[in-house]
Amino acid sequence: MLLQADPTVQYALGLHRDRLFYRDLRVDSPYNTYKYPGLPPGPIASPGRASIEAALYPARVPYLYFVAMPDGHHEFRVSSKAHEEAVRQARHAREPKP
């Protein structure tokens, strides 16, 4: 399945953006997990010990989706419908306040 992980697209672009746009998702790179299924061909950062241990011994959780919120935390969801609602909440939180 497509992972559709924004950090992999940022890696493919070679820069960090607070927000990606649909045009960014078109970058042609094997690291673009919106275009290529499965894991990217290599790491996108230098993982620390905790990350390596988490990869070796993953938590048993039902989550398939996550959304990065504007304040830096992530929301995890188990269904596509719940994920889409979290995306709407993230977009609403990004809207300029009057």
Image: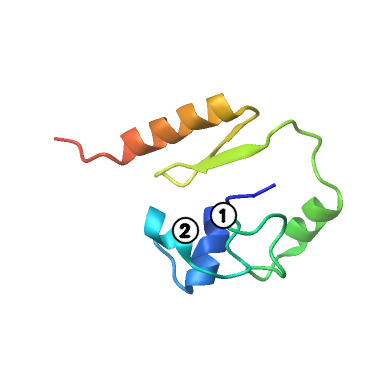
Q: Residue 34 carries which label?
A: 1
Where disc 2 sits, the SS reads helix
Query: Which residue is drawn at the image coordinates 44% and 71% (left, top)?
Result: 15
Q: Is residue 68 above or below residue 19?
A: above
Counting from the top left corner in percent of width and height, residue 72 is at 46, 47
Decide if residue 70 is in sight here: yes
Q: For the image shown, how many numbered marks are present on the structure?
A: 2
Q: Residue 25 carries which label?
A: 2
Comparing 37 with 90, the one in front is 37
Which quadrant of the view contains residue 88? top left
The residue depicted at 57 percent of the width and 70 percent of the height is 29
Tell which circle, 2 or 1, labels the residue nearer the N-terminal end. Answer: 2
Name the residue type under label 1: Tyr
| Disc 1 packing (10 Å; few <14; some 14–19; many ≥20) | many
Q: Where is residue 78 shown, x and y percent of the image?
A: 65, 28
Horizontal side, residue 75 vs residue 17: left or right: right
